[in-house]
Image: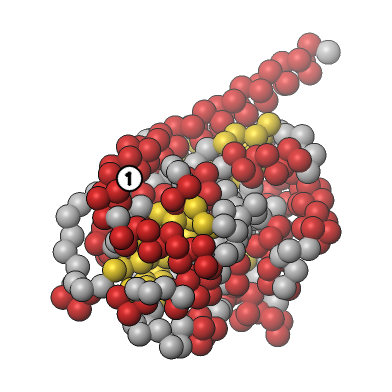
Amino acid sequence: MKITIVADIFGYENNGTVKTIRRLIDGLVEKGHEVKVVSPYKDDSSENPKYYAVKRRTFGVFDNYITKLNGASFGVPDKETIRKAVEGADVVHIVLPFKMGKAALKICKELKIPFTTAFHCQPENVSSHIFMENSKLVNKLLYLRFRRFYKHTGYIHCPSQFIADMLEKNNYKAKKFVISNGVVPTYHKEEVEKPDELKDKFVILFIGRYSKEKRHDLLIKAVKNSKYESKIQLIFAGNGPHEKDIKNCAKGLTNAPLMGMIPQEKLAKIVNFCDLYVHPSDVEIEAIACLEAITCGVVPVINNSYKSATKAFALDERSLFKQSDYKDLTKKIEYWIEHPEEKAKMSEKYLEYAKQFDISLCVDKMVDMFKEAIADSKKSEQMASVK
């Protein structure tokens, strides 16, 4: 199958959306599909003709801040480049509802090429940057704004049932395909010894961008509130615009958080020696990082936020803390510190549960969505010719 992927945001793998796009591309290629990619990114490893790079969008005085927020660059909707990339494709997959995506949608309609879309940008991801993530009105307006794009498609990839339900609630009419973004084989259970400097510590990991809605502050407050504070070592894998705020919040901890971007291979090793994974984020469409942790058998504790899909990964109440309640998070952390036998039992259950999120299975489901879009397009053409 010839598949073109249009991604407004792409580049270095330092945010969830970029990782998702990269893994989909790699998974499709591994299964023998011919993939073209339109984005503000050029494959630096070779002159790969399957990458169609557009120029990076700039935002004047806000350019540096916006780039930091997203961890990647937006692309200019170069119609000539997009057209070259989509011509001859069996199907086009449009990842985001921004300018490049809109241009690609129009070209697909003009050339009568089947296309599908994905919903990776939650309104709260946008509103949090203007400190209005809790405004129902603002988020409702953003859902309405995004709907202007999605009303033109018949197929939306939803990384979780949670976001599919939110789209249904906000009157998105297209067929919704609930398919996890998937976990790559790099993340699997293996015996990894803690470094010497951490052997006497209870290590808690959180993987996520340093942005406001990820709520690193909740986890820091929970640790400060714990009777085991001096024993706990936090690891915050990621980067982002709020790094300084997180470090300021962490002042006073006996053990300062270990922070920074970590290459995937090394991160998988780190995940395997951690004692607990905590996901305090208020807003998540899926949170593949949490799935990566449980795929390694690490027991999670997750924010039971009504704006987050991640809570669905909790196998019982011991893996959930009350929405944005750091004191309840303290209780859950202390429970797992005090009950290592129970933690070992739950580790086995999470390992079994995580098998359904294998990237290969998820890519197969994406291909099924593409095939349905192609088949429906052919039926529509046949019906039109009969008329």
Give 117 or 105, whichever is nearer the viewer: 117
226 or 59: nearer the viewer: 226
Q: x, y (%) of residue 40?
A: 56, 64
Q: From the viewer's perspective, is 377 left or right of 335?
A: right
In-image side of 312 versus 195 (left or right): right
Q: Which residue is mark 1?
A: 346
| Residue 261 % position (x, y) | 39, 72
Q: Is residue 51 visible?
A: no
Residue nearest the observer in this picture, 270 or 384: 270
Q: Residue furthest top?
A: 386
The vertical placement of 22 against 209, above or below, is above
Q: Amino acid at mark 1?
A: Met
Give me the residue at 65% from left, 62% from top: 125
Relative horizontal placement of residue 172, taking residue 213 as reference (left or right): right
Which residue is located at x 68 percent, y 39 percent? 165
Asked if residue 133 shows in the view, the reply is yes
Tally the numbered discs. 1
Residue 105 placement: quadrant: top right
Image quadrant occupied by the C terminus: top right
Q: Identify which residue is drawn at 31% across, 68% down.
A: 203
| Disc 1, SS | helix
Give x and y (percent) for residue 265: 28, 61
Q: Please provide percent x and percent y for residue 289.
A: 43, 56
Figure check: 49 above or below 113: below
Label 1 CA crowd tier, 10 Å (few <14, some 14–19, many 20+): many
